Amino acid sequence: MHLFWEHGYEATSLAMLREAMGLTPPQIYNAFTDKETLFRKALERYHQTEIGFALDALGAPVPTREAIRRLLLGAAEAYSRPGKPGGCLFISGGLATSPQAQAIADELKTYRKASEAAIAERLAKGKAIGDLPEGLAVGGFAKYLTGVMNGMSIQARDGASVEALRSLAQIALAALPVEGQNKAPSKE
Amino acid sequence: MHLFWEHGYEATSLAMLREAMGLTPPQIYNAFTDKETLFRKALERYHQTEIGFALDALGAPVPTREAIRRLLLGAAEAYSRPGKPGGCLFISGGLATSPQAQAIADELKTYRKASEAAIAERLAKGKAIGDLPEGLAVGGFAKYLTGVMNGMSIQARDGASVEALRSLAQIALAALPVEGQNKAPSKE
DNA sequence: TAGGTTTCGTATCGATCATTATGGATGAGC
DNA sequence: GCTCATCCATAATGATCGATACGAAACCTA
């Protein structure tokens, strides 16, 4: 998982995987069928072990703004963990691929779209509760927040510290509607 | 350039380049020395032909906030041009590479860092002019804006329309200090 | 027009890719 | 203790990578 995270799907050779796992090629193929299946397993593992912060943040019983704050600050921490590759596997894994690996690129895109959808869902819930203005464009803000997190992933890969990422997250939060304007607009 | 933009440095094979350029391998090597030099030429060309909006925006004789607005909206347009690969070559070109292509990854990182530095310079100028609050953290905001643009690049690659990117840019602008708080703080 | 040179496309190079066939070692059965 | 079957690491496979050596065609000179 770390190798795919660091080098992406295509640039990670079986020789690297073999050395890292201490397995022979037949052992790898017996256990994981082929490289693509192994990568998908790594994606699942990453989803379960490395980005629990996202589900925790979006599912926490807190106001929407606080949930988003936890989401972005969690990303700042998760994208810059010591001893781990910087950024997010769902982006580093394969943003630009060869035509042969199109299926992998699509899979990663699906994960990214799922993140955006989860954020949109939380925002919609916030609007329903009265946490957010009724006029708020849920889809647009979900794209903004996803974009910010994606950008943090690249900044992390470029060596940004956890403090720098936290600072970025704090600034990004300022784009959200302020508390005073929430709780249902004044009309009617 | 379009091939590198679409598939990244490593995933773009010489066979693809050969077919796209209509040249034989020796012609390519006579003209460009090797694949790495060809890629660097493509980077230069991209810098000159595709992202003039950034220099225009940062260099325009307008208030800082307007300059940043033009920068982000220009990115929205540049990252979703019809007939061009989505996103920014400086990101798509190679975010996660094999160890052999580390030099390419570093080169791309240098370009990205230069963008961040250019934004930081413009923000510092804005602060000096009085466009921005004296207490504003230039480096932090530069990282934020760079991150937003990087995120837009990924959103574009995932199929975001120019309208969606413009909307994202508009939301991101809300994180900047509002006009009323500028022109030197009230103390003293 | 004949000769010599230069140019240029084809075919091939070694290296590496993901994947699998094969032979030797190991352990069970009698 | 000997035979046989099973397992597994080494070695090889076809494909493709970036890069180049060779042969043919073309052109300029005499």
Image (cartoon, coloured by chain):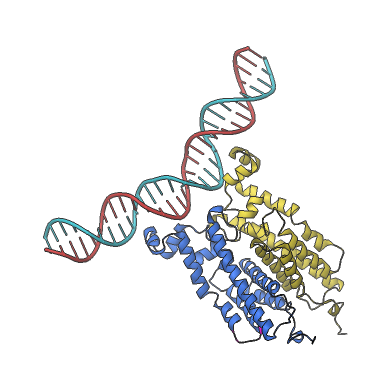
Chain colours: A blue, B yellow, C red, D cyan
The residue sitting at 63% across, 76% down in the picture is A119
Q: Nearer the viewer, residue A145 or A152?
A: A145
* Residue B23 in which image quadrant: top right
How many numbered circles are shown? 0
The residue sitting at 62% across, 69% down in the picture is A153
User: Is A43 situated left or right of A66 in this image?
Assistant: left
The correct choice, above or below, for B164 with respect to B14 in the image is below
The correct choice, above or below, for B115 with respect to B171 in the image is above
User: Residue B26: x percent and y percent?
Assistant: 60, 38
Q: Is residue A87 visible?
A: no
Q: Nearer the viewer, residue B9 or A146?
A: A146
* Residue D27 in which image quadrant: top right
* Residue range corresponding to the magenta coloring: A60-64
The single residue placed furthest to the front in the displayed view is A188
Q: Quadrant of the C terminus of chain B?
A: bottom right
User: Residue A142: x percent and y percent?
Assistant: 67, 73
The correct choice, above or below, for B83 with respect to C29 in the image is above
User: Residue C16: x percent and y percent?
Assistant: 48, 51
Tell me, yes or no, whether the highlighted magenta stretch contains residue A44.
no
User: Is A33 situated left or right of A169 in this image?
Assistant: left
The residue sitting at 60% across, 72% down in the picture is A115
The correct choice, above or below, for A126 with respect to C6 in the image is below
User: Is B61 situated left or right of B148 in this image?
Assistant: right
Q: Is residue A129 visible?
A: yes
User: Residue A179: x percent and y percent?
Assistant: 74, 85
* Residue B177 in which image quadrant: bottom right
- Which is the main secondary structure of the residues drawn in magenta? loop
